[in-house]
Amino acid sequence: MTAWLNTIAQGVLVGGLYAMFAAGLSLIFGVMKLVNIAHGDLIVLAAYVALMVTDALGLNPILSLIVVVPVMATVGYLLQRGLLNRALGEDILPPLLVTFGLSVILQNGLLQLFSADSRRLQAGGLDVASVKLAEGLSLGVLPLLQFALAVLVIAGLHWLFYHTRLGRAFRAVSDDPRVAQLMGLDNRHVFGLAMALSLAIVAVAGVFLAVRTNFDPATGPARLIFGFEAVIIGGLSSLWGTLVGGILLGVVQAIGAEIDPGWQVLAGHVAFLAVLAIRPQGLLGGARR
Amino acid sequence: MSGGVTRATRASNIGLVLALACLVALAFAPFWAGRDGMRLLIDAYLYLVLASLWNLLAGYAGLVSVGQQAFVGLGGYVLFGLAALAGVPPLLCIPIAGIAAAIIAIPVAAITFRLRGAYFAIGSWVMAEVFRLVASQISALGGGSGISLPAGIVTAMAASRHGREILVYWVALGLMVAILGGIVALLRSRHGLALTALRDNEMAARSNGIDVRRTKLVVFILVAAGTAMAGALIFLQRLRISPDAGFSVNDWTAFVIFITVIGGIGRFEGPFVGVVVFFVLRETLADLGSLYLMILGAIAILVMLKAPRGLFGFIAERTDTQLLPLQRRVRGV
């Protein structure tokens, strides 16, 4: 019994990480209808940036966020202004194929720079520390921290969307980019800021990913898929939905892994397909798209 | 000359004659191309088939899939399963793989079609991952490490290695002609007109009475069947399949997308140009390894942004050229 409780608790905490993968993806889809196929590779890029920062400055990985977050946000802004804005338009094909090309470039660029060896960040004792809740049930400090940060990120995004000028700009360009422009918004700049924010979240997710598991240049696509599954399970266009979707995915994967290690990822995919078949608007989604 | 609608132009007439002449020359390739040459040609045929099918799917029907590796691997596994476990002759397995994929494509479409536009792309990718993970769970087919075609089956196809290579070459050429011919016939038919309308403007197509969902479904099923047959042949040539090779997103989707985009998406001739560019780059730059893939990705991005109709579209729009009689033109009015 406690073994299962443990499994579910671990799954919930991993779900926080998936929610962060999903939140960045959902944010830019919401603002500019862009599905970023390179999202997972950008998460892995953030992990490598954290690796370089910790190596160069001798920082604890969690502290390296001070550097990694602004670096990735800048990358996001420049990427949007320099490349992705040019691909946006009525046709869905150009943004999809451009981000697909970007994904291949990132994967192979990382391979060229860092080789295919899998890496991991050491968090100096923090990664093995744990809190004991009951006999046989203890939670790692790092997963708890990661989950708390995920909730904070989603709550922060929610606040930003509905209570700030920037959030209003995001909603305006999302509702009608032409009218938003007429009202004096510079869409290209707003899109740039949205991508910067998305990659800031990616940076947090990337650092926690790097501490939690081994990563190598080829691990990006799986992160994209987990984030995407969390978005769809939770419901498109619902920020809290990404958290619910992430948790559900984490739990299903944990249960699958408990039954047979080969079923971990497969169980998540099956849950995703089941939601798509039974409730395509997602668990928290409102009207059908 | 009477007025009306025609598809033929002078260039397309010349193109047709040239295509037939090329075909005759290619049929005799075993007598003039060496082993390496033949292998390169087989590769080119199969990539041309995969790219033309993806072009039909994404360029015409608007179904931008990044999960077609699902059907490449499925085709390969159907062939290996039937040939190695049930003793079905490998060549007979190729059409069976097509039929199996067409049947499996129906539930796949039922689920993935619930995702619109760009989300369909990632949904199709998840589906391919499911196929890969399921394949690696089937221990009778070698699980995660894969399976080789038993030697007895290989020698039963043809006594010598040379003979088998010639056989595979002719089957590949035949499959290419059949599938490309099928695409041309489809595009020239009433359904092709519907597809072209769909390509140009989905909403306008719908308002003109085209059943968009049904058209997309039919294209998805046909493309799945063709892709699986190509997949079966790819792994018949390799004599070995594993989940990672069969369901590789790089080999069966990234390259295929790059070929189509660089050559020209939404034009039948596009993949031909793309395949030529792809193989020229591959033969000259392949030693660069991952750098080569970065260059390929960068070229695809550049083409998508600067010439969204690809190299062929870029030329065709400026010269009003088509190499096959596909476009309908009004004349003599």
Image (cartoon, rainbow, N blue to C red):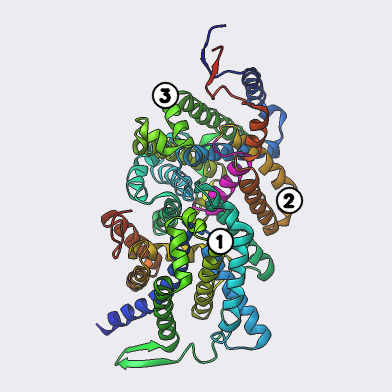
Residue at 59%, 61% (x, y): give it: A80
In front of the other: B113 or A130: B113
Instruction: Place residue A104 in its image quadrant.
Output: bottom right
Dot 3 lies on which element? helix
Read off the residue under disc 2: B285
Are the residues under badges 3 and 1 in a single subunit? no
Instruction: Place residue A243 in its image quadrant.
Output: bottom left
Q: Main secondary structure of the magenta part?
A: helix
Q: Is residue A180 above or below residue B233?
A: below
Q: Real-space Cα distance between discs 3 and 1?
A: 45 Å
Residue interval drawn in magenta: B247-266
Q: Nearer the viewer, mark 3 or mark 2?
A: 3
Quadrant of image for the C terminus of chain B:
top right
Image position of B44 (left or right of B226): right
Give the chain letter at badge 2: B
Q: Residue B139: x and y, percent?
A: 40, 58
- Does the magenta segment cover residue B253? yes
Q: Nearer the viewer, mark 1 or mark 2?
A: 1
Q: Is residue B299 above or below residue B22?
A: below
- Mark 1 nearby-residue class (10 Å; few <14, some 14–19, many ≥20): some
Residue at 44%, 53% (x, y): give it: B128
Quadrant of image for the N terminus of chain B:
top right
Dot 2 lies on which element? helix
Read off the residue under disc 1: A186
- The three-letter code of the residue at mark 3 reads Arg
Read off the residue under disc 3: B190
- The three-letter code of the residue at mark 2 reads Leu
**Residue B132 visible:** yes
Image position of A233 (left or right of A62): left
